[in-house]
Every structure is written in structure tokens, then in C-alpha cells.
Amino acid sequence: MKLAEVFTMVVPEERGVGFKAFDGSVAGPPDASVVLDIRTPRAVEYLAGAPSQLGLARAYVAGDLEIVGDPFEAMMRLYPSAKPHLGIGEWLRLVGNFLPAALKRPTPPPQEQKLTGSRHSKGRDAEAIHHHYDVSNRFYRLVLGPSMAYTCAVFPNADASLEIAQEEKFDLICRKLGLRPGMTLLDIGCGWGGMVLHAVKHYGVHAIGVTLSERQAEWGQEAIESQGLAGQAQIRFSDYRDVPEAGFDAISSIGLTEHIGRENYPSYFAFAFGKLKQEGRMLNHTITRPSDAEPSHYRDS
């Protein structure tokens, strides 16, 4: 079974995606603006082992699969696939041809972290954050720019720089929290301290930020001290669950909820509620999806 035949089974022709593979097979419009190029047998193992965006991403990062043209446009056209509409005979053909590849699966690269301990325990969370964020601050400075902000930004206009857009995001959060001079702020999962620095400098609050990344805490604390803000702010290398203080006027949490696990939402929000003053405010920023109808979207979170 040629790979192009598989492609035509799962990707409708009207999506206009070209295809070529190492086995010499081709499919799709000859003048397609985006082309999926399966370069090695290992790419098939990635795709068969995780037949979703995850498998495609792994093959792409490993260099076994290439996307010719705009990758974003390609993803929009490729997904969702047409697999649910396949007949039983087509499914059996796919399974018969690609089950060996799915069972084989490539050996994970050495840099892929294998976590230990109970999911979302303090130790395992710390291990995961250390692996992801403690690469080096120099690396993240190259990726993120001067703002050192890892979450999405708010662009006030089309010509705004990323740095301006990140400042606009922090300011929008400060305004929504109603921050005023003398108030206290807890920033949960503070990263390199961008929110803490902005709130202290522009709104005169006293702020504590907590992060599970030692490198982030070092960067943030150095920034605080170099700007003469040590009397008003601090960045702690700590699990948010270990913050002893309470009675905060406001809590910000920007991009942390994705990391804590669906089953921990009640305890997370209960913790935050318990740290606020009566009538205090919390702003929780997170990525959501239109529907949780597909259990695979959250069952292992």
C-alpha cells in the first residue's frame, strides 16, 4: 500500500494539500501551495504511533517530515482528518499495513524528559518545569526578546512591537485587577517576573511572584534588585502551594492553569480564594478550547 493512497483516504481532495513520500508516491494538486513531504520510514512510525498533530509534530521536529509552504496553512487544511468517515474495510487495510509501524515507534530522543512520581505532585511538577525552563536564560532571551514573557500578548495596534504588546497585556491585567499604590499582589507562576515588575513600577503595589524554575527566579530577582525595587517585590523559587502569606488584594495567574491538571482545578482555585482578602480579585489567564466533547483532549492532563 503506497503512502499516497493512505493520504487520499484521510485527507479530502478538496483541501488542496499536495503529498509526496520516500516510496515515490504522490497525491494532491500538482500546483498545491502546501505539500506534505514524508521523507523517511521513521516519519511513518511517528505518524502511525500518534496519528494526530502530535505524531506529525514529532516527525517534523526530527527532520523526517517536511512541510513545503506555510506550516500554519498546512495544519489548518490537514486537520481535522477524515478518519471518522472511513469504512470498516478501509480501517482494516490501514491497520493491516501500519500496525507494525505503530507498535515499533521511534526511540524517544535523549533530551525527552521521563518524569517520575505521581502526576502533578510537587516533585513531579518541579521536575517538569526544571526540564523545560531551566535550559538557560540566555536561550529564552533569544526566543522571547527583552520582555522575557512566555505567554500571549495584546497588540494595541498592528504596528506594535512584541515588547509593547507584552507591556499592554500586563497593563490590561493590572487594570482589570484594579491595582492601586500600596496594594499587595501575588503572581502565581510568575515566570521571569514581567507581571511583578510592571505592577510594582507602574501601579505602586507590593508584589510576590512564585515560580518552579530556579533560573527564572534568579533572572527575576536580579531584575528587581537592579531596578531598585527590592523593597516592594520579590521572586521566589517555590511551588505556589507553599506560599505562606495570605490576605492579598489581588492574585494574577498568567498561563499556569494549563500545567496543574484538570483534576486539580478545585484545589487550585480554593487555594487562591483562601489567599485573597475579602472582596479581593483574581485574574486567571489560560488557554481554552470551544468544546471538551473529545475525551482524549483532557483525559491525560
Image: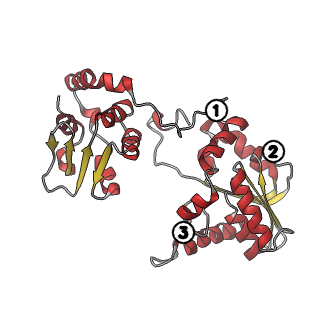
Mark before the other along the chain sequence, 1 or 2: 1
- Residue tagged 1: 119
Q: Position of residue 152 (x, y in %)?
A: 54, 61
- Residue tagged 2: 242
- Can you tell which quarter of the image residue 220 is in? bottom right
SS at mark 1 in the image = loop
Find the residue positioned furthest to the left. 30
Given the image, on which type of amino acid does mark 1 rest? Arg
SS at mark 2 in the image = helix
Please name which of the two marks, 3 or 1, marks the residue nearer to the observer: 1
Q: Position of residue 51 (x, y in %)?
A: 35, 35
Q: Is residue 277 left or right of residue 28?
A: right
- Residue tagged 3: 154
Nearer the observer, 114 or 53: 114
- Residue 179 makes an appearance in the image: no
| Above or below, comparing residue 269 to residue 252 in the picture | above
Whole-angstrom CA distance, mark 3 to mark 1, is 33 Å
- Residue 21 makes an appearance in the image: yes
| Label 1 packing within 10 angstroms: few (<14), some (14-19), many (20+) | some
Given the image, on which type of amino acid does mark 3 rest? Val
Mark before the other along the chain sequence, 3 or 2: 3
